[in-house]
Amino acid sequence: MSGLLLLGTACGLINGASDLTTAPDLPDVPEGAPAADAGPPSDATSGSTDADTTTDDGGDASRPCVVPPPVANTSGALSALRAPGAVVIDGQLDEWSCVPFTRLDRASAGQMFVSGDSGTPADFAMEFAVTYDSDALYVAARVSGTAPPAGDAPTAIFKNDSIEIYLDADGVLTGRAGPNDHQLVVDHANREERYVVMSPPASPTAVPVGFASAARTVGGVLSVEARLPGSTLGKSSLAAGDKLGFDIAVNDGDGTGARTQAIWYAAPGCTCTVGCCCGAAQDMPFCNTQRYGSLTLAP
Ligand SMILES: [Ca+2]
Ligand SMILES: [Ca+2]
Ligand SMILES: [Ca+2]
């Protein structure tokens, strides 16, 4: 299939795994993926009953749109467009077809964490996007090349094939996560965890009220959607111009601790001194909010 299908197509046409076969810059999806990956969709959703949240302005699923193919963004500054329509947290990314995605792979990652994985330099990649409405922030991710699903660690789910979302609401980056900082992990089975303070041992806590996620695997491609209410970021509503600390990572793991993590951005400069901060062995966004990039909400 031609990657040009991504250009000038109609909203709703692109969906889930088909994106990865059409996107021109995702060569990491092997031709003829393992049969084990091509089975029936594996759906998992969870979260509050208000997970299927609509945007304020509705939307037109048939409205034509033009979005560029996913490209890397190594600047550390990301912007999110307002959601063009309703975002339904079901692991199907149809409604994201008019939202630009950013590519994250080993080559473009701001930081890599490798712990026992024997993968090759190009064996997994993620495309991710962020959008919002007045009530919530939404994150979508498509992960390819990890041969998901894998890893069934019931806790410390970052050991499984998973994604991690990092958010800071108040612009105060002290290293350690504060009350409105979030490290949210969603794995291929839609297990969810939040981590707050990463002083060993790491202890997951319940995800925030109103957080919802869904994970779906089709054809070896893991699609994840997540919703984080503005209230959990200390905001009564979200609006254009808001700026948040933001980062995201993808884990290729087997559940045992052997994993490879690609982190979108790792900000240079560091002033914190407590915990695994500047220059410490695990000086990464999960442990040091000063490594976050930024997310600006655009009109
Ligand atoms: Ca959806
Ligand atoms: Ca994997
Ligand atoms: Ca903060």
Image: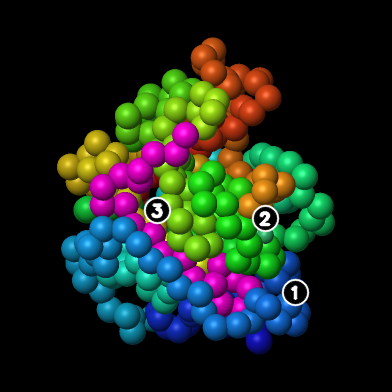
Name the amino acid type tagged 2: Asp
User: Is 34 part of what is drawn in magenta?
Assistant: no
Q: Tell whether 69 sits left or right of 100.
A: right
Label 2 lies in ligand 2 vicinity (Cβ under 8 Å): yes
Q: Find residue 181 and report its horizontal and vertical position in percent.
A: 38, 34
- Label 2: element kind: loop
- Residue 27, visible in the rendered structure: yes
Q: Which of marks 1 and 2 is nearer the N terminus?
A: 1
Residue beneath disc 3 = 80
Quadrant in which the N terminus appears: bottom right
Examine the rendered structure and indicate whether residue 169 appears above or below residue 50.
above
Real-space CA distance between mark 1 and mark 3, rounded to the nearest whole angstrom: 30 Å
Residue designated by label 1? 30
Q: Name the residue under label 2.
A: 254
Q: What element carries label 1?
A: loop
Q: How crowded is mark 2: few (under 14 residues within 10 Å), some or many (20 or more)?
A: many
**10 Å neighbourhood of mark 1: few (<14), some, or many (≥20)?**
some
Q: Which amino acid type is shown beneath numbered disc 3?
A: Ala
Q: Nearer the viewer, mark 2 or mark 3?
A: 2
Magenta residues? 203-222
The image quarter containing residue 285 is top right
**Nearer the camera: disc 1 or disc 2:** 2
Q: Nearer the viewer, residue 298 or 234?
A: 234
